[in-house]
Amino acid sequence: MKYCDKCKVSVRGNREHCPLCNAVLHGEAEPSGFPRLPNEHKKHKLWISILALSSVSACIICLLLNFLFRKHGQWSLFVLGGVVCMWMTLGLALYKQRNIPKTMVWEVFLVGLLSVLWDYFTGWRGWSINYVLPIVSMGVMVVLVFLSRLFHVAAGSLIVYLLVDALMGVIQLVLLLTGCITVPLPSLLCVGVSTVMLAAMLIFRGRKVREELRRRLHL
Ligand SMILES: [Zn+2]
């Protein structure tokens, strides 16, 4: 076993430096007592690289085709925009993959924002706020509740994410009342589900909600 002369402790494994004082360890290395964990990230890495290469080549092919057949307009820019949006949502999911509920709420915001931008720059038709926003935020709310049952996500953090997602319902209500939404059914459903969810949280977990908010917002 390796030994630190300064701390007078034996250290398992084949570390070079003492974990306490960072001094150089002396003695023979011995196998660490911990099992080797499989690196999940590495397995995904190959697929991500393949996906990256195929999206880059798809973009290049589209740009070249668009250049050849210019009279059909600048459609390749839409392909490029689509690929960029796909990588933004995928990147967010991969970057925050350890906390699934948090990732999902962030995705709601990102997908909502990107769809509003798409809608805006392709001649506003309102599909982003009529359909995408209500359906995505409603879907995430339902999935979050199922997740909490399946994976026993800590109730405290889940409450916060549900709360944030339910607030999206409030935004929908504002959009509805100001007449921005032209197809009211999805938004009405979303507002309804959000309100029921908020009420359920306050009725069943009222104390936990208050505790969690006080803890997080430093009230
Ligand atoms: Zn030491």
Image (spheres, grey):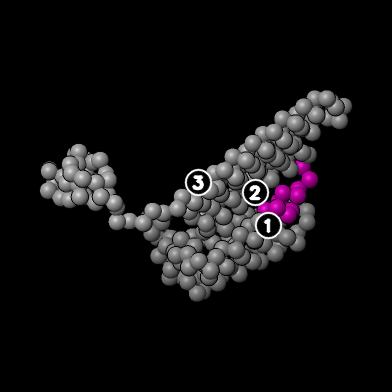
First in residue order: circle 1 vs circle 2: 2
What residue is at 17 percent from the left and 50 percent from the top?
A: 10
Question: Ligand 1 near label 2 (Cβ, under 8 Å)?
Answer: no
Q: Which residue does the numbered mark 2 point to in the structure image?
A: 112
Q: Which residue is mark 3?
A: 42
| Residue 132 part of the magenta segment | yes
The C terminus: image quadrant:
bottom left
Give the left or right position of residue 136, taking residue 11 as reference.
right
Task: Give the image location of residue 35, x and y in percent.
Answer: 36, 56
> Range of the magenta residues?
124-134
Q: Nearer the viewer, mark 3 or mark 1?
A: 3
Q: Write the residue at 80% across / 29% down.
A: 65
Judging depth in this view, the residue of 11 and 186 nearest the camera is: 11
Disc 1 target residue: 134
Label 3 is placed on what type of residue? Lys
Separation of residues labelled 3 and 1 (CA atoms)? 36 Å
**Height in image: 55 above or below 145?**
above
